[in-house]
Image (cartoon, rainbow, N blue to C red):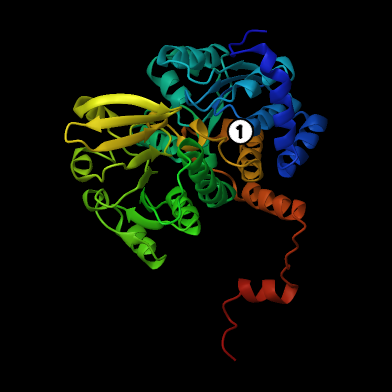
Amino acid sequence: MEHHVKDESLAPAGKNRIEWADKDMPVLASIRERFEREKPLAGVRVGACLHVTTETANLMRTLKAGGADIVLCASNPLSTQDDVAASLVFDYGVRTYAIKGEDNDTYWSHIDAAIDHRPQITMDDGADVVGRIHAERTEALDGIIGGTEETTTGVIRLKAMAADGALRYPIVSVNDAMTKHLFDNRYGTGQSTIDGVIRATNRLIAGRTVVISGYGWCGKGAAMRASGLGAKVIVCEIDPLKALEAVMDGHRVMPAVEAAKQCDIWITVTGDINVIDTPAYETMKDGAIICNSGHFNVEINIAHLRENAASVREVKPLVEEFALKDGRKIYLLADGRLVNLACAEGHPANVMDMSFANQALSAEYLVANAAALEPGVYPVPEEIDHAIAALKLETMGVHIDELTDEQRKYLASWQEGTV
């Protein structure tokens, strides 16, 4: 079977970790059992570009159980878990192209391998496959019925394509499902980002000043976890509503150039470019640690650091020290790539359970409904979102109330009010 992974001998360890994660992904497991019986994806070719982690492996198992023919590649050069990639190939028969630390050329060759599969469904985390197909591999458009997108950054790109009239097939925005962004982005990113910072640096968080750029769901999660560990949190925002929310949540809010003077640790989660830029570097506190938990490594202007450093060295794995000409030192984690995946293991399985349940059910939805969908970006159908939430509650042993007939009638009427 064609593949490109680091080392076949890593497969047994990867299989153990995949099974461990599966124990905390009961919703996806229940979908896999149904897919095994019903085969809703029988013969459907899937080109998946996702972080190759234990949780993703269980999604691949679910798609394969449904009958899908899959090629998987990495959506980030530093996010692959090499033992998991090996196990996917040698234990589960999933063609996988992913090596942690792969160079840029290898990264794109792996994406081309997924496109060479001539997928009928694309499954993206960052829209690199979709972008490549539309810009350079247009021959692959023939036969694609639809796609899914996992992350905010990818959705932004896809909506821009749709607005320009460039998007050629329908894509379901898994990222915008309530059971994804309310939980994965907030609790998953929040925990895994702080986990990545701690694993990379072994710095105490309590008493430090942590700056968060971007107060969307990911930023809220990171701020919440940093605050919970005793950090003093500063938020940098461009949206007045989100800035106001940060203030109401008890955080200080200020421009980046002011925050730079105080920051011990700086985390970007915006999806935009050069969020930490020249003005911030000019005032940045000596010894500051900077990192990114947004999808692409463009949020930090790394070129400025390299151009203005008197010396650069790796002081420990994935920690680079930039000694500036004025004597200050700034520390960059994971080359500005996703710190939660490069320096830790990404989101915990329990929260990815819902995100990847959305992926699996959205793929099933596309097979059944893509013929009726025009090119564009679509939300996950509400019934899928609610079904996943209900399944998750069931697996947690949590029960909720149901409306009575009287209550349904009241909510559906306009005649009744104050009596």
Relative to residue 398, is residue 369 drawn left or right? left
> Can residue 273 be seen?
no
View extreme (top): residue: 1
Residue 50 vertical placement versus 153 (above, below): above
Viewer-proximal residue, 48 or 67?
48
**Residue 146, horizontal then vertical, whole percent:** 55, 29
Viewer-proximal residue, 22 or 343?
343
**Residue 302, horizontal then vertical, whole percent:** 29, 30
Residue drawn at (70%, 51%) of the image: 392
Q: What's the amino acid at mark 1?
A: Leu
SS for dot 1: helix
Residue 209 vertical placement versus 21 (above, below): below
Residue drawn at (42%, 19%) of the image: 132
Residue under pointer 1: 366
**Residue 284, horizontal then vertical, whole percent:** 24, 44
Residue drawn at (50%, 58%) of the image: 228
Relative to residue 369, is residue 168 drawn left or right? left
Residue 271 vertical placement versus 323 (above, below): below
